[in-house]
Image: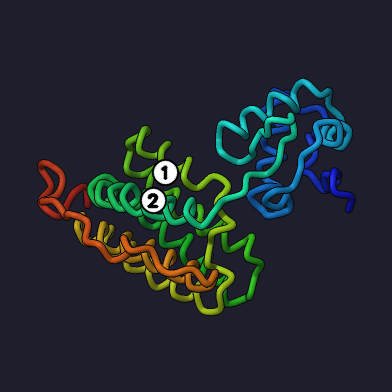
Amino acid sequence: MAEDAVPTQLRQIRPGVLVNLADAVAESLRAAILSGQLKSGERILQESVSADLGVSRQPVRDALHRLHAEGLVTELPNGRVIVREYTHEDICENYLVRRVLESEAARIAAVMMTDAEIDELQSVNQSFRNAAHEHDSSTVLNQLNDRFHRLIRVAARHPMLEGFISSLWAGLTIATPLSIPGRAERSIVQHEEIVAALRTRDPQAAQRAMVNHIDSACREFLRSSGVPPSPVLGMTINLGPGLPGSSGKGHAART
């Protein structure tokens, strides 16, 4: 493939479906980036995307501006647009902020989640287990892992917190350690610990389980990359007394 070419396997816009073209183009490019089809540092040519998707260049420009705002692409001073490249410092900081925010989301979710939502979370982890057993692609595992974490932050019912965490996930599937032998199996066990804490409505246990899970993933990714572990790994997060009115039972009766 030529240096300036964009792969022709971009997800096509379905004919006959009324959509905002910029939204559709952004969705197609986002999927290509998050799946690894478009690599870090790879140039995206507006005319190539326009021709591949059969749209004018204006919705492509709008889509690229949105992806830049999401942190998925970088607009260079010379006008070129490339898939964003992340340094190890970026990735370490991302894990650190995720550790703080996602553990808080898990603490809140222990009180807010319904039984049905916890059942769905457990079902997703079972699908994750099945995919790992069948040696499915890292793309499938990444999608299931993303869904597991997304269900928790959504169930916390704090839209601003959810939005912050979602922005930390955008574009950083390159930093997943799921391709490391044995990591998927370790993630399954750690997911089970999170689910168990949520099911018993224990905010502190849910928070600790999420901290341990994210620390473990970060440690394995850095080790596999030959980078020294972050000095903040293992630092204790202050585990408060729980949410006001929480008795450890939360909303166990909710369905």
Query: Percent position (x, y) of residue 231?
Result: 33, 63
Q: Residue at x 58, y 63 (%)?
A: 141
Which is more toward the observer, 137 or 61?
61
Residue 74: image x %, image y %?
A: 64, 37
Q: Could you tell me if residue 127 is visible in this image?
A: yes
Residue identified by numbered label 1: 165
Q: Is residue 255 visible?
A: no
Count neighbours of disc 2 (C-alpha within 10 A) and say few if under 14, some if 14 to 19, many if 20 or more.
many
Q: Amino acid at mark 2?
A: Arg
Q: Horizontal placement of 202 versus 124: left or right?
A: left
Residue at the (59%, 57%) spot, across then down:
174
Contact between labelled residues 1 and 2, with CB atoms less than 8 Å apart: yes
The quadrant holding residue 14 is: top right
Q: Nearer the viewer, residue 51 or 114?
A: 51
163 lies above or below 153: above
The answer to which of marks 2 and 1 sits earlier in the sequence is 2
Give the residue pinned by disc 2: 98
| Pick the front one: 249 or 96 | 96
- The 10 Å Cα crowd at callout 1, few under 14, some 14 to 19, many 20 or more, is many
Identify the image quadrant of residue 216.
bottom left
Which residue is rendered at x = 22% and y = 56% of the image? Answer: 237
Horizontal arrangement in the rendering, residue 227 relative to residue 174 (left or right) = left
Residue placed farthest to the front in the image?
Answer: 77
State the image coordinates of residue 38 (x, y, percent, origin top left): 73, 50
Under tag 1, what secondary structure? helix
Q: Amino acid at mark 1?
A: Ile
Q: Is residue 46 above or below residue 169?
A: above
Q: CA distance from mark 2 to mark 1?
A: 7 Å
Q: Residue at left 80%, top 39%?
A: 12
